[in-house]
Amino acid sequence: MDGKIFLGGGGPDYGEKQGLSLKYANRHGLIAGATGTGKTVTLQILAEGFSAAGVPVFLSDVKGDLSGLAASGSAEAKLHSAFTSRAEKIGLESYSYKAFPVTFWDLFGAQGHPVRTTVAEMGPLLLARLMELSEAQEGILNIAFRLADEQGLPLLDLKDLQALLVWVGENRAELALRYGNISVNSIGAIQRRLLVLENQGANKLFGEPALDLSDLMRVDAEGRGRINILASDKLMGAPRLYATFLLWLLSELFETLPEVGDPEKPKLVFFFDEAHLLFDGAPKALIDKVEQVARLIRSKGVGVYFVTQNPDDIPEDILGQLGNRVQHALRAFTARDKKALRLAAETYRPNPRFETEAAIREVGVGEAVTSMLMKKGVPGIVERTLIRPPSSQLGPLDQALRANVMANSPVAGKYDTPKDRHSAYEMLRDRAASAAKEAEVVEAQEEEQLTAQREFSAARRYSGGRVSRSSSRSMRIRSDDSFGTAMGKMVMKELTGTTGRKIVRGILGGLFKGR
């Protein structure tokens, strides 16, 4: 199918080829269906199709199954006969097994190349969402980011943000005149949330070297788009971290890539698996941001495909922008399920051969109700489609092959070693050390002055300037050796006696009286 990705066969006998037009692939899409109905395989064959067409792909591997894209399927596999039979039934000519170029990524750096961003790039809105901050706490976080810009303090990792919040707390009285009240309790709450993030492994997400988006848009020597797979099985233990990272990545693509209009094929296709996690409990400001990105990023040549169990998981304003749809079976066990099923069916352009609602309920595993955009972006008539079998390995890749793929990756070694350059934490530490040193110097000078004053007040210091007349007279006395010597001995003898001591006390008491 020229200019299309072959999805499978439709029609009465599944002999009519169904495909996704590359020209409209950046108009976004939806892959939905209950657990076990074949969503993962659909995602896999779409990734294969885009890669073969020279379009790079980014997807998250929640269960580990999609790592098999890096290996070829095998004629010795258990499902080989079923796959070849299905390929013949849907008219997939020259079906063969092949591997695809894959780059593995992992926030924790265990099952793929480390992927990082900086705190500054994440921004206060997404961080507030990640930490579930209140409005007041989010306000303080915005103040911290504003101060970091004004003070020239790079926010790269979590310790930078923690140090900046400490500084904000110490200077809250001065800052309150400009930014309003800054509560110590709110700062403490943010610090505790940052500690929770660290315990979830977010400290490995924030730092440098940060991800270069161009590394996600590579093609191999044969012109095939590389499939970037984010290992997410462990990451799903922190669902907010997972959803916030993917939303950040989508936002970065939107802000970085140039406008391209409507290209003949996308520059990148982004699959957002477990998409409901993005919207669960999300504030309106965040949903508005997602809607804005989804609406505008297609002009950057990026297609976004949400993968979830139920279309009802996606806000209506965003759902309305998803033109290419693959709907696997939905189970209607409750009144809410039945309502969601009916609403899902109403969004499709009807087919006179069957009822859409009944088809969504009845399609089997590996079968789906599909609707793809046609000429001028018009939604196609809904069709029951038997999904084509994958060419790559079905199921996870073993660890030895994964390690080999990583070792031969075009980004091998680029992100492995973290960098900790001079940033807000070090700058604020240096400022504090410098201020402490200056304070010590000033304190020492003040102490010296106070000591001198106390000694002077207590008559422990004799100043020659205050007894210049006595000094001049003693010099005249010393000039006459015989008389001076005799008088000196006599005076010293008298002063060493009781009478002499009384005289000295009386003289000194008169000199320093009242001082």
Image (spheres, rainbow, N blue to C red):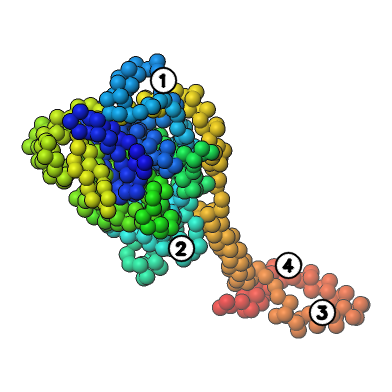
Question: CA separation, marks 2 and 3?
Answer: 71 Å
Which residue is the site of mark 4? 497
Which numbered disc covers residue 74? 1
Query: Which numbered marker is on residue 495?
Result: none
Asked if the residues shown at circle 1 and circle 3 are in contact, with their CB atoms under 8 angstroms apart, the answer is no
Q: Position of residue 99 (x, y in %)?
A: 45, 29
Relative to residue 101, is residue 479 drawn left or right?
right
Q: Earlier in the sequence, mark 2 or mark 3?
A: 2
* First in residue order: circle 4 vs circle 2: 2
**The one of 366 and 206 positioned closer to us in this rendering:** 366
Q: Residues within 10 Å of mark 1 (few under 14, many from 20)?
A: some
Q: SS class of the residue under badge 4?
A: loop
Mark 1 or mark 4, which is nearer to you? 1
The amino acid pointed to by label 4 is Gly
Name the amino acid type tagged 3: Ser
Task: Return the residue at label 2.
Answer: 149
Mark 1: which amino acid?
A: Ser
Which of the 4 quarters of the picture holds residue 6? top left
Report which quarter residue 41 is drawn in: top left
* Position of the N terminus by quadrant: top left
